[in-house]
Amino acid sequence: MSELSSLPLGYAALLEQLKARIQNAQVRAALAVNQELVLLYWSIGRDLSQRFEDEGWGTKITERLAKDLQAAFPGVEGFSPRNLRYMRTFAEAWPEPTILQQLIAKLPWGHNLRVLDRVKDRPTREWYLRAALENGWSQNILVHMISGQLHEREGKALSNFQRTLPPPGSDMANQLLRDPYNFDFLTLTKPFAERELEKGLLSHLRDLLLELGRGFAFVGSQVPLLVDGRSFYVDLLFYHVRLHCYFAIELKSGEFQPEYAGKLSFYIAAIDGTLKTAGDAPTIGLLLCESRSGPIVEYSLQNLLQPIGVSTYRLTRELPAPVREELPSVEDLQEVVLKLRAETENKTGTADAD
């Protein structure tokens, strides 16, 4: 009889339950350790700030304090002069214990440092920290969102959501959309076809999902909609797991045109009629254009019954061919480097001989 067959009934289920419980406890312990570390750094920074202000300590004290702490706790990281300076800046940026407990200490120390380094005003710092906590951003994603100035783009699309969606869904949908969308992971030469844009986005689907935001699940591209025996195709179709609805995205090169809204309105109605189930909320449409006129968009959406948003996008442009041809190639640059290196070595040899 094998060892597994001799185990009592229910053992396997109990093992899985215990493993899940231990893993959850490990996660909670890691979070607790992180919170205690951030609170410790804040308290050290607060004391340093008070000493520097009240007793006029000089900057050399930080160097000495770091040396003494490292000697007292060998092998423990975090007590470098640079980190001690960060602790002081951190405590001065968030002097209130309330927000520290409710938000700041819930994020890793590295997240807080990235925000301190890259964002200067307090409201924007708080915005990014809350977004990082709500969306579970890693440090790299947080830095990417700060670099892309997400706080200035979120909720800025033009839409008819307030009229076509019931609250609070209308507010949630509006906050989901951005303007402009940052497709800097694409490099296209103008003029480009819409299928080129679509192909580029599909080849960078992970980057696209990151830019769209949390909750978007990819359904497909050129999704067919069969209406009265004819097939119509949606550029990109997503499902939003928090709003519980389909998201139809149409890609356009150039400026927004009023007829784009009518066509997308038809697609939305067709999705609601052929794909939407009883548990789904109304389908939402998003038109992505290179540019748009606010008044033209508003008039185009005014009488439409389907919820539609209109945003622009920006992307990295390739240099025009004539300009690219004038630039040195990689081989040319390597040749220049080798030549400079040889000249430097010759000068050094001559100086040594003298």
Image (cartoon, rainbow, N blue to C red):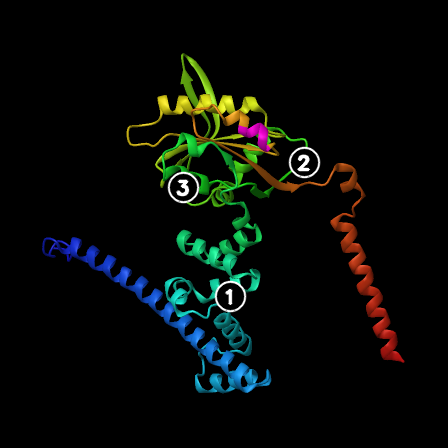
Mark 2 nearby-residue class (10 Å; few <14, some 14–19, many ≥20): few
Residue 139 in picture, x, y percent from top left: 48, 58
Q: Earlier in the sequence, mark 3 or mark 1?
A: 1
**Amino acid tagged 3:** Met
Residue furthest right as drawn: 354
Whether residue 237 is visible, yes or no, is no
**Which residue position is annotated with label 1?**
113
Q: Hey, which quadrant is residue 108 in on the image?
A: bottom left
Between 189 and 310, which is closer to the camera in this rendering? 310
**Amino acid tagged 2:** Thr
Residue under the point 59% across and 85% down: 58
Q: Earlier in the sequence, mark 2 or mark 1?
A: 1
CB under 8 Å between callouts 2 and 3? no
Which of the labelled discs sits on residue 172, or is there none?
3
Q: Earlier in the sequence, mark 2 or mark 3?
A: 3
Residue at mark 2 to residue at mark 1: CA–CA distance:
37 Å
